[in-house]
Amino acid sequence: MSMKKSDIFLNGVFRDNSICRQILGICSALAITNLMMNSLVMGLGVIWTLALSGFTISLIRHYMPNRIRMMVQTLIIASYVIIVDIFLKAFYPEMSRELGPYVGLIITNCIIMGRAETFALKNNPLNSLIDGIAAGVGYTLVLLIVSFVRELLGFGTILGITVLGDWWVSWSIMVMAPSAFFVLGLLIWFINRKNYAH
Amino acid sequence: MNNNKRAFTETKIYPIVFMILVAAIFGAILSVFYHATKEKVALHAELRLKTAILSLFDLPQEDVEISYLEHIKEKQIAGLDYYVAVSNDSTLGYCFHVTGSGMWGTITALLALDTDFKEIIGLTILDQNETPGLGGRITEEKFQSQFSGKKIRENQEIVYYRLIDESEQASELEINQITGATSSSKAVVDIIYENLQNIIFIIAEKDDKYYE
């Protein structure tokens, strides 16, 4: 089974978007989308982890004993996540504190295990790398859309830059977790509305 | 050759060998990353600590290192490390490390006391592993600032602050707890109480002017 690389990429980003189509990775999408900067850094961390864990798992897929593959995958994923954590701690301590435990929780992000199990185990390393980047970009895009709405309405800013003037009364609900449900729910409905229209 | 390899991959120890090998490789990679960044991380932690101490006493933080050198003296008394804040030759107060167990892990904080050891100047939580969004809110300014100006002694006894509902009006010896995070709120109050016992005991022993 050979796939065009552009197809793998477009599938990952749009057609099979992990959050909107497969409803995976919701936990972090709800938790860290109150600021766009947090979402962007989280997204980059997930892209890195997805791409490299997919690549590594695909590389050793023929040697990996089937019964312990979950354990091996978790170990590989965890290692890449810890690298992200160390990197943030050393070079972006503010961001590291802001994201707090959510960086470590990338390990449990269902998208990563999902891509490893459904794609990396069956495809060559290069395709797995592309698939990982694509799934990560898809995830990041959704995070950025949700956080754009939440940050704009909740703080009146975009990426920390004030865009709405003093007349704007910030919606404090947008800063809190429940609003992520509303915004993400509306977004998923909007994207999938055609699928259910008869 | 191929047959041999096949045979080995089907033995019972192959998964164990495989797992150990993968763990060793990734463990080695991680330890290289960890050691390469260790100093940088420690430097950030030190800077953060200094900034936190300066801000507890409302001291200038434009240049943390210079301001810290000018205003803060590191001291030790009976094995207890503490910081003295000085401004224009007058002592502003003392700052102590306080620590204890929270709901999930250790909570460490800085506690600043006035020169008479009568009230709290401020509290800053440095590290905690409480539930994000619930217990994690103990780091919020709204919760921490409640401790500023609180009396720590009454009739020679250390005060144990009573926790009340978030919506109620707190009196002098009460603290508004965080809704949904009673354990974490209580942990902070306990940590202050227990550490104060120790701090006041040591201070009083060394210098009885603090117990009038």
Image (cartoon, helix red, strand yellow):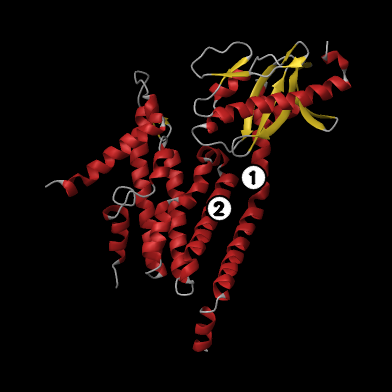
Binning the other alpha carbons within 10 Å of mark 1 as few (below 14), some (14 to 19) or many (20 upward) gives some
Nearest the viewer among B179 and B21 is B179
Q: Which mark is residue B41?
A: 1
Vertical arrangement, residue B95 with respect to residue A16, above or below: above
**In 3D space, how far apart are the residues under numbered discs 1 and 2 (Cα atoms)?**
14 Å
Expressed as whole percent of the image width and height from the top left, the position of residue A137 reads 37, 52
In the rendered structure, the answer to whether residue B16 lies left or right of residue B64 reads left
Q: Which residue is at a point 28% across and 53% down the rendered structure image?
A: A14
Nearest the viewer among A80 and A78 is A78
User: Mark 2: which amino acid?
Assistant: Ile
Q: In front: mark 1 or mark 2?
A: 2
Q: Are circles 1 and 2 on residues that touch, CB within 8 Å?
A: no
Expressed as whole percent of the image width and height from the top left, the position of residue A111 reads 39, 53
In the rendered structure, the answer to whether residue B151 lies left or right of residue A192 reads right
Vertical arrangement, residue A161 with respect to residue A87, above or below: above
Binning the other alpha carbons within 10 Å of mark 2 as few (below 14), some (14 to 19) or many (20 upward) gives some
The residue that disc 2 covers is A82
Nearest the viewer among B21 and B47 is B21
